Image (cartoon, rainbow, N blue to C red):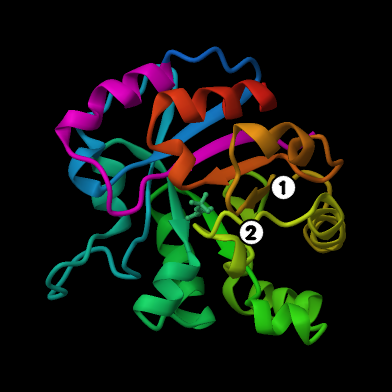
């Protein structure tokens, strides 16, 4: 059975004033569901790991070197992370990260012992052109390195048009994609949906056969918002 995972992506949000929210999230009963919080790197080493796992939001392909402002997978691991998001659409758009870049980052995450949460997703134009499954297959083929297993990789399907927009993909749209992904990655790998997940829509999405959890942005910042999403999965 794929592992159930509720992952929160805090993006460029959060200071030490946010630590009580992380503690409250960690204290939320989660049953057999893993709770993963991906805060800004500045907060990683300040968060406890009781009740949750920690993740980075990106890692450089190299372990160290002359890359001002970047962060490496061994550094994330040293700060307490056991997961790392790779290929988030905001990184692909803001930093021009290609599938090949994401592939190299994912390998770097594995090398440091981190589980990669590899994100793929289509734009609205691609969906409207009927290209969704072809785009996702190409992204997966280009960014998932050889050697991916259910132990080292989680796939997050995040339609770009649903991220931070309040527009959530319909259960039918999510099911179509997740069923296709399941056929490609095998029976054990966790498949997360991401894109405007909130308390009001989480249960319906998590009830889908091949949805094993969520990658949650805005609604993961406050324990009051994230806790009911965790409960819907647990
Ligand atoms: C995300 O950034 O991964 C995400 C899904 O964001 P939101 O939940 O805010 O749409």
* Quadrant of the rendered image containing residue 29: top right
Q: Are marks 1 and 2 in contact (CB under 8 Å)?
A: yes
Q: Is residue 194 magenta?
A: no
Q: Is residue 210 above or below residue 170?
A: above
Residue, disc 2: 148
Q: Which mark is residue 189?
A: 1
Q: Element under label 1?
A: loop
Depth check: give the residue in front, 164 or 213.
164
Left/right of residue 76 with respect to residue 181 in the rendered view: left
Identified at 29% across, 35% down, the residue is 80
Residue 208 position, x and y percent, is 84, 41
Mark toward the viewer: 1 or 2: 1
Q: Nearer the viewer, residue 129 or 185?
A: 129
In the rendered image, which quarter contains the N terminus? top right
Q: Earlier in the sequence, mark 1 or mark 2?
A: 2
Range drawn in magenta: 1-26
Quadrant in which residue 137 is drawn: bottom right
Q: Is residue 232 above or below residue 142?
A: above
Mark linked to residue 121: none
- Quadrant (top left/top right/bottom left/bottom right) for the C terminus: top right
């Amino acid at each position: 059975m794929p592992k159930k995972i509720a992952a929160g992506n805090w993006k460029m949000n959060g200071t030490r004033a946010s630590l009580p929210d992380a503690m409250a999230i960690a204290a939320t009963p989660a049953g057999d569901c893993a709770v993963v919080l991906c805060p800004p790197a500045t907060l990683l080493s300040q968060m406890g790991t009781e009740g949750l796992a920690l993740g980075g939001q990106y890692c450089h392909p190299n372990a160290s070197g002359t890359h001002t402002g970047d962060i490496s997978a061994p550094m994330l691991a040293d700060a307490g992370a056991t997961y790392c998001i790779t290929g988030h659409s905001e990184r692909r758009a803001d930093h021009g990260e290609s599938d090949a870049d994401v592939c190299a980052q994912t390998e770097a995450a594995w090398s440091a012992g981190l589980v990669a949460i590899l994100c793929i997703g289509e734009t609205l134009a691609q969906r409207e052109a009927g290209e969704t499954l072809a785009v996702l297959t190409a992204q997966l083929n280009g960014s998932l390195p050889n050697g991916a297993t259910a132990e080292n990789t989680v796939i997050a399907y995040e339609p770009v048009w649903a991220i931070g927009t309040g527009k959530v993909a319909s259960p039918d749209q999510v099911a179509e994609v997740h069923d296709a992904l399941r056929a490609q990655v095998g029976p054990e790998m966790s498949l997360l949906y991401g894109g405007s997940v909130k308390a009001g829509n989480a249960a319906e999405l998590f009830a889908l056969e091949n949805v094993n959890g969520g990658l949650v942005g805005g609604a993961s910042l406050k324990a009051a918002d994230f806790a009911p999403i965790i409960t819907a999965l647990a």
